[in-house]
């Protein structure tokens, strides 16, 4: 029988409420589940950098997405930390839209997602499963992420310069699978290819607790 150590904690950010376990700004909920290592005589498949659907990350996403949906949540992002094919940490970010994520949400998801991963046996090594909200200055990855926040201020870090810039802050005006468009002060409308974006996140004014 497997024993799993679990730890719940509120992350200390502006707007977190320790009394009800909910973030008023979508930040606090964090749940940690540790899977101890037990030797398994399973032949593992070496993953190659193919399409996301065929990668380990894509396979895990396809397993966990319906679990989140069944809880009335959406899978926002998934990060694998560690060696390729043998992650030591699986970070799952879920979102409800309005209302924030509670500790109970994360605890329930962690138990269910951990059970699914154990049954499927995609990962044979020991790993930590972390479930949390994406936070207020959340990273944006997919076209639907950008489209959801049209009109908001975002910060882009680029892999190569666009219009002489590798760091861009502006108001999001458009988004597609190929590019995003920002209204940049002193520049105007700037089209940035999606392939150039290394990191994108919302920009929030902590003085007001609102997105700029």
Image (cartoon, grey):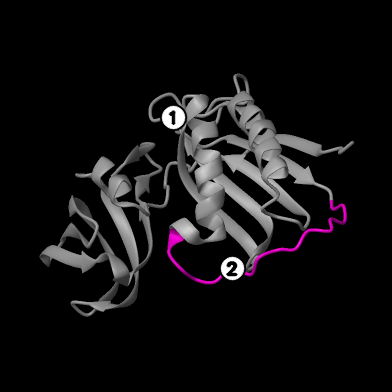
The answer to whether residue 55 is visible is yes
Q: Where is residue 124 drawn, in percent x and y?
A: 75, 56
> Where is mark 1, residue-wise?
96
Q: Residues within 10 Å of mark 1 (few under 14, many from 20)?
A: some
Q: Where is residue 203 drawn, in percent x and y?
A: 35, 50
Q: Residue at x 21, y 44 (%)?
A: 150
Q: Residue at x 62, y 26 (%)?
A: 18
Left or right for 9, reference 187 = right
Left or right for 60, reference 186 = right
Q: How many numbered tags mark residues here?
A: 2
Q: Residue at x 69, y 39 (%)?
A: 114
Query: Which residue is at the front of the view, 113 or 162?
Result: 113
> Where is mark 2, residue-wise?
47
Q: Where is residue 141 drawn, in percent x and y?
A: 37, 54
Tag 1 secondary structure: loop
Query: Which residue is at the front of the view, 203 or 113?
Result: 113
Which quadrant: the N terminus? Answer: top right
Magenta extent: 37-52
- The majority secondary structure of the magenta stretch comes to loop
Left or right for 108, reference 100 = right
The answer to whether residue 15 is visible is no
């Amino acid at each position: 029988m497997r024993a799993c150590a679990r730890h719940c904690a509120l992350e200390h950010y502006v707007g977190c409420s320790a009394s009800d376990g909910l973030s008023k700004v979508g930040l606090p909920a964090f749940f940690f589940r540790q899977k101890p290592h037990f030797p398994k005589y399973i032949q593992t498949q070496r993953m190659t950098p193919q399409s996301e659907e065929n990668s380990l990350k894509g396979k895990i996403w396809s397993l966990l997405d319906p679990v989140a949906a069944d809880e009335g949540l959406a899978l926002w992002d998934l990060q694998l930390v560690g060696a390729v094919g043998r992650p030591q940490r699986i970070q799952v970010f879920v979102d409800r839209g309005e209302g924030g994520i509670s500790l109970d949400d994360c605890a329930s998801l962690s138990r269910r997602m951990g059970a699914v991963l154990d049954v499927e046996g995609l990962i044979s090594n020991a790993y930590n499963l972390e479930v949390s909200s994406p936070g207020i200055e959340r990273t944006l990855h997919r076209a639907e992420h950008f489209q959801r926040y049209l009109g908001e201020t975002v910060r882009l870090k680029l892999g190569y310069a666009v219009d002489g810039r590798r760091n861009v802050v502006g108001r999001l005006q458009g988004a597609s699978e190929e590019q995003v468009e920002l209204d940049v002060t002193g520049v105007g409308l700037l089209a940035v290819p999606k392939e150039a974006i290394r990191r994108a996140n919302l920009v929030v004014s902590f003085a007001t607790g609102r997105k700029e």
